[in-house]
Amino acid sequence: MSGHQAAEHAEVVAVLGTVSWDEFLVLDCLPTPGSTAIIQQRVESGGGTAANLAVALARLGVRPLFVTTVGSDRFGAALLAELEQENIALHIVPRPAGTATDRCTILVTPGPERTILWHPGAHLRLGDPLPLDRVFQARIVVIDVEDQALRQFLLDLPAHIAPRVQLVGPLTHLTALPAERALRTAIQHDVLVGSEAELLAVTGCDQLRTAVETLQQWMPLGATRLAAITRGRDGCVLVSEREIVSCPSFAVDAVDPTGAGDAFTAGLIYGLLERLPLPELGRFANAVGALATRRLGARSALPTRDEVLEFIAQAQPCS
């Protein structure tokens, strides 16, 4: 069956969001004005937070529906060719001729650390012909869209279409909003996931502790029952209205952190589908995120379910 055609059965997870073409430049240092950096390696591959998440789910054995859009250029064609090799049900929203594909130039420097230069291109927006009936047949719907009008439209739908759907909201595209508006939008999702920096931006706080407390105070006002906050080498924190669970990270020989957060989100969703207790949920998601950093590129090291379970059995979490 073509990746562009609808599947005959409903997928358990639907992902809506961006795909981008990534150019990775491994540098000996991050250049400052007037300085020179040496390019040690250059790689091109598909990326985009939502696409990375969809691929990560597929590698874990969960076939998602991925709703996205690309431009009419060679980058869009390359992205579709990559995605069609994965176990993903694709729905591509068409764009007019001449539309550019979303692209990123990612500078990877010692640490490893990354700096992203974004070339905005095609993205989903309100008014696009989306397969909403199929999307809301899923048990979990991930809303990872830049267009806030489209996000709000989708948030308003499940109460009428599928009240038992869990909406997962990555915090990435909410950080540009004023803090109170961002927080009010965030708590309309059942599950939130993001980095510590993103949570600080959304809550308007300057410390993790106060940000978590603020989120817990807002949770009863909305739909959110769980928030998963990544902290890099410090693992993650899972937050419910009355509980905070800290889960340590795993030690790996990291090459590139790009896509680790997307992999973490895939691990979190897998754990939610399996109804894992919070400590096991955080441990599994941390393991998926850690394994994703082993090679250059957002998807090159995404693990299978068996690889994650073997890694967890053998690895020791960081203390």
Image: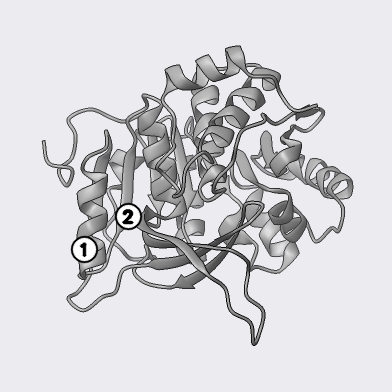
Residue of label 1: 94
Q: Is residue 119 left or right of residue 242?
A: left
The CA span between labels 1 and 2 is 9 Å
Residue under the point 27% across and 37% down:
86
Residue under the point 51% across and 50% down:
155
Measuring from the top left, give residue 150's x and y in whole percent: 44, 61
Measuring from the top left, give residue 235's x and y in whole percent: 72, 35
Residue 16 vs 13, above or below: the answer is below
Label 2's element?
Answer: strand
Residue under the point 59% across and 17% down:
312
Q: Residue furthest left?
A: 1
Q: Residue furthest top?
A: 313
Residue 10 in which image quadrant:
top left
Q: Is residue 133 left or right of residue 285?
A: left
Q: Which mark is residue 209?
A: none
Residue 186 vs 274, above or below: the answer is below
Taking depth in this image into account, of 158 and 83 the one nearest to the observer is 83
Q: Amino acid at mark 1?
A: Pro
Which part of the image, by quadrant, shows the C terminus?
A: top right
Q: Residue furthest bottom?
A: 34
Residue of label 2: 68
Q: Is residue 153 left or right of residue 63?
A: right
Q: Amino acid at mark 2?
A: Thr
Measuring from the top left, give residue 264's x and y in whole percent: 56, 37
Of the numbered discs 1 and 2, the one sitting upstream in the chain is: 2
Residue 48 vs 177, above or below: the answer is above
Residue under the point 21% across and 79% down:
98
Taking depth in this image into account, of 1 and 221 the one nearest to the observer is 1
Label 1's element?
Answer: loop
Which part of the image, by quadrant, shows the N terminus?
A: top left
